[in-house]
Amino acid sequence: MTGIHRLGNPLRHVFARGIVAAFSLLAAAVPLAAQTDPLPSWNDGATKQAIVDFVTAVTTEGRPDYVAPADRIATFDQDGTTWVSHPLYGQALFALDRVTAMAPDHPEWKDTEPFKSVLSGDRIAMAKFTEKDWMEIIATTHAGMSTADFEAIVADWLPKSENPVLKRPVTDLVYQPMIEVMEYLRDNGFRTYIVTGGGQEFVRVYAQDVYGIPPEQVVGSSIVTKYATVDGKPALMREPKVFFIDDGPGKAVGINLFIGKRPLIAFGNSDGDKEMLQWTTDGPGARLGLLVLHDDAEREFAYGPADGLPDTKVGTFSQALMDAAKGNGWIVISMKGDWKRIFAFE
């Protein structure tokens, strides 16, 4: 560069123009789609195009379906929609690990169900746990502490967690195509919310880091919380009682209660998301409902039982839901056909 300075400004200008021209040629050599594609982990096709067309329609001023930014709401179920839910929901894995961690203080659990089956690793017995069994486990492992203590326990567990089949921490098993959709929507003035049947306080611990969604934009199931004074300081104490179940019809109620506006677009994956999609797409103007179908046994899991896929009690996508999707014009996302890659680490 010393030589260039000695030769004066004209040569510097020529040099600069040459650099600009070189970069312009390089940019021209890259296909336009590669420069502008907001959803690179999605295969080109009708599903991807429908998302882009919808966002374009509601965000372009002068279009008949234009919606002001204040009303651009997008909701996402979590388990099975934004991250892996098989063979067990992430929060269920947390609860089982908590039973093991707490067992030394509860020797009676060795002879008491459902804790006995958990501690002995009896997966056949655990697969038959009833809702009452799970409620007892949740009440025991999630309550009797402050919200601050609970959040600290969850934060400590997350990097140590492991999906028993995929052998990775639960926060690694987030669907990259859905992360891209969230970012694309936010780039276009949407507020994105997690609306989950999982625990609200559980998801709030990692929502910002994993999804870019702040904790106040997480709507989930919750247990009773009471104000108390502990060691002379105010605390919110978690009690072993259900306060709100954010699943099925509860999702529409939760959206109204905590968000206060009907979403423009909603993503789900199971029978528990039907009412959220109904509530979303029945509103005026342009609306879009989408369901993730797990049909890729090679890269993730395959289950339904819609379209003849294996049956499951974890994130059931029934044939009735498939029929409802067709009847309501909801888009069914095929993991196998619509997603170029599933996880960021692929």
Image (spheres, rainbow, N blue to C red):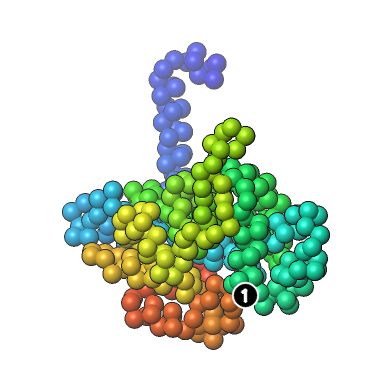
Q: Position of residue 176 (x, y in %)?
A: 54, 58
Return the residue at label 1: 130
Q: Look at the image and tell me whether residue 56 can be seen.
A: no
The residue that appears at 58% across and 82% down in the rendered structure is 311
Left or right of 37 on screen, residue 60: left
Left or right of 124 on screen, residue 78: left
The residue that appears at 27% across and 59% down in the rendered structure is 57
Looking at the rendering, which quadrant does residue 90 occupy? bottom right
* Quadrant of image for the C terminus: bottom right
Left or right of 87 on screen, residue 244: left
Q: Position of residue 258 (x, y in %)?
A: 38, 53
Residue 89, placed above or below residue 16: below
Q: Position of residue 260 (x, y in %)?
A: 32, 54
Q: Specify the amino acid type for callout 1.
A: Thr
The residue that appears at 46% across and 27% down in the rendered structure is 15
Q: Residues within 10 Å of mark 1 (few under 14, many from 20)?
A: few
Q: Look at the image and tell me whether residue 4 can be seen.
A: yes
The residue that appears at 59% across and 32% down in the rendered structure is 232
Residue 2, placed above or below residue 110: above
Looking at the rendering, which quadrant does residue 297 occupy? bottom right
Q: Residue furthest bottom?
A: 308
* Quadrant of image for the N terminus: top right
Residue 274, placed above or below residue 197: below
